[in-house]
Amino acid sequence: MPPSPPFFPFLLLLLLSAAASYALPAFREAPAFRNGPHCPADATVHIAMTLDSTYLRGSTAAVFSILQHSSCPENITFHFITAAPDLHLGRTVSTTFPSLEFHLHAFRPSVVLPMISSSIRPALDDPLNYARIYLADLLPESLPRVLYFDSDLVVLDDVGPLFNTPLGSHAVAAPLYCHANFSAYFTRAFWSNPRYTSTFRGRPSEPCYFNTGVMVIDLRKWREGNYREKLEGWMKVRRRVRIYELGSLPPFLLVFGGDVEGVEHRWNQHGLGGDNMEGRCRDLHPGAVSLLHWSGKGKPWLRLDSKRPCPLDLLWSPYDLLKRGSVFDDR
């Protein structure tokens, strides 16, 4: 890991996180999900997610949906990345999912704070939004791969086949959207500089947009390719020149665009939270659906609580484990 900035900003963040954790919502206990007789004993599926008080309700719904649709739920191990060693968050997870195998991994916001530039939506500038860059540093070296999920999604299918996606020579697999306007994710300052645009030369294919909320990551290839340093390099460039507007997504497109193993689109029906400014309702993309992802400004639990849900938010609500009658339940 790179050297840490001064300790006191991190200490302040730690204290603020600890204060927030005392006001965590209360959740119902999820049912226990058990393996069937066909499940192998040595085929663990490792899933990484960030965990904080702001998105805790979304995280519990995501975990519930993953377990409910898994054919071998006891083979799943969760790795929760927290902004501080927060025992209150861990206690909430363990009481909501008593049978769940999980680990907490503390991420220091101070590692990435000096490299974060303001973007079009403040939520995208949260240091925890960049924790996916550091998974290979945070998770055990013995772990060969991990399935990364955002906290604003629900899964409607068995994640085992997705986790076992053959990656070939690639370090990352994700649904690719080659019909999207890739150039729109970068500014004129980027496209007018040959030194920047040359990064795409020699890639296995033309760069395509992919959403970083659902990724299969080969952690060994990641370390061998020094991808954390490459992503940080582009973030440092962005501190000097405004080559993109969004948060942690553009560095991934710069480093991995044209070098991603594609998976079926059904594994990331993203954009259900609308755009980053207004969060308007959206429809599903054509095709099969194995995962619903509320990327964008609008989150289903907030729209449901405001009694102004979008139609697709009703597909999220069956996985909401918020305990009715708690101070966090406005309905």
Image (cartoon, helix red, strand yellow):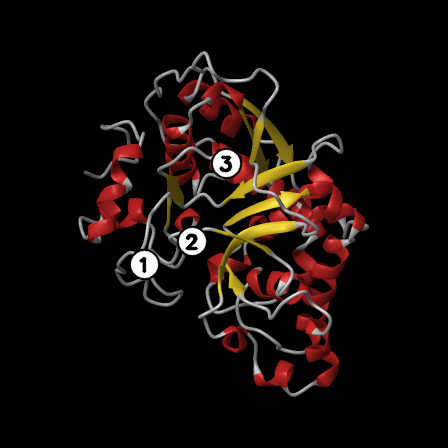
Q: Earlier in the sequence, mark 2 or mark 1?
A: 2
**Residue at mark 3:** 161
Q: Are marks 2 and 1 in contact (CB under 8 Å)?
A: yes
Element class at badge 2: helix
Q: Residue at x 37, y 58 (%)?
A: 271
Could you classify mark 1 by the number of other residues whose Cα lies within 10 Å: few (under 14), some (14-19), or many (20 or more)?
A: some
**Residue at mark 2:** 265
Q: Residue at x 33, y 55 (%)?
A: 272
Kind of residue sitting beneath label 3: Pro
Q: Is residue 273 left or right of residue 194?
A: left
Q: Is residue 123 left or right of residue 196?
A: left
- In front: 297, or 43? 43
Which mark is on residue 285?
1
Q: Gap in Å between the C-alphas at discs 1 and 3?
A: 22 Å
Q: Gap in Å between the C-alphas at discs 3 and 2?
A: 14 Å
Q: Is residue 304 left or right of residue 190?
A: left
- Residue 328 in picture, x, y percent from top left: 30, 36
- Determine the residue located farthest toward the bottom in the rendered image: 192
